[in-house]
Amino acid sequence: MKTLVVCYSNSGTTMIVAEYLAQALTADFDVIEEVKPRPPLLYKGERSKAGGGTFVKAVCAALFGRSSRIAATRKDPSQYDLVLVGTPIWAGSVTPAVRSYLRRHRKQLRRVAFFCTAGMPEKSRAFRQMKRLAGKQPMDTVGVKSDDVRTDACPLIIDGFVKNLKAAGQAEHLASVVAPVTRGETHSE
């Protein structure tokens, strides 16, 4: 199954997870970039000192479901069987950049899976938002606590996610092979 991992990452945390996933799945990798990049909102786990209300603006944009202008991506998602989309969680929501990506490519996505990084990803509504924006049920989702990303816990979490995706892909392949037989079609020998 030809796979693409794509993510937006402001502080680098989500990028670490995305790169690990791309390597584990032998997938292509792409980055969602805003036309006007935001200053890092977190640095070494602490709020940045970026001025002008940068942190508040970013949180409000995510909370109120705003999109942002994103640059064209290098990879065409329509060329992939599965696209994994990753986002940090801001105020329990999808980032504006990922919201824009999913809106832009909604019709080009065959199958999707979602991943996120957050302080408490299990409390997030982001996966519901991503499902709605993509217009598809994800094959699987995984949330990684930001504190776990740079520890030994991250590979264990990601490996479980990868195994689920591979099993789901194999099940879909088998269903497509078996389906013609169950519809009364015959195979010539």
Image: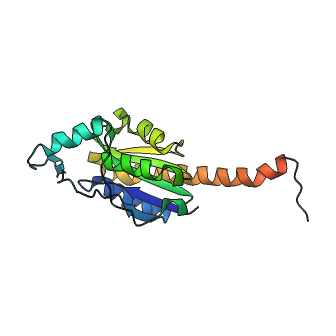
Q: Is residue 98 above or below residue 63?
A: below
Q: Quadrant of residue 35?
A: bottom left
Image coordinates of residue 144 in percent, x first then y, are 35, 45
Residue visible at 35% across and 57% down in the picture: 32
Q: Quadrant of residue 36?
A: bottom left
In this image, 97 relative to 27: left or right? left
Residue visible at 81% across and 52% down in the picture: 180
Is residue 151 visible to the viewer in this orientation of the structure? no
User: Is the image coloured rainbow, by chain, by secondary structure, or in one colour?
Assistant: rainbow
Q: Quadrant of residue 60?
A: top left
Residue visible at 64% across and 54% down in the picture: 170
Q: How many marks?
A: 0
Q: Quadrant of the N terminus?
A: bottom right
Is residue 172 visible to the viewer in this orientation of the structure? yes
In this image, 85 relative to 170: left or right? left
Q: Is residue 36 above or below residue 53?
A: below
Residue 158 vs residue 81, the one in the foreground: 81
Residue 90 vs residue 172, the one in the foreground: 90
In this image, 63 relative to 140: left or right? left
Q: Residue furthest right?
A: 189
Q: Quadrant of the C terminus?
A: bottom right
Residue 186 vs residue 153, the one in the foreground: 186
Image coordinates of residue 74 in percent, x first then y, are 40, 67
Image coordinates of residue 8 in percent, x first then y, are 33, 54
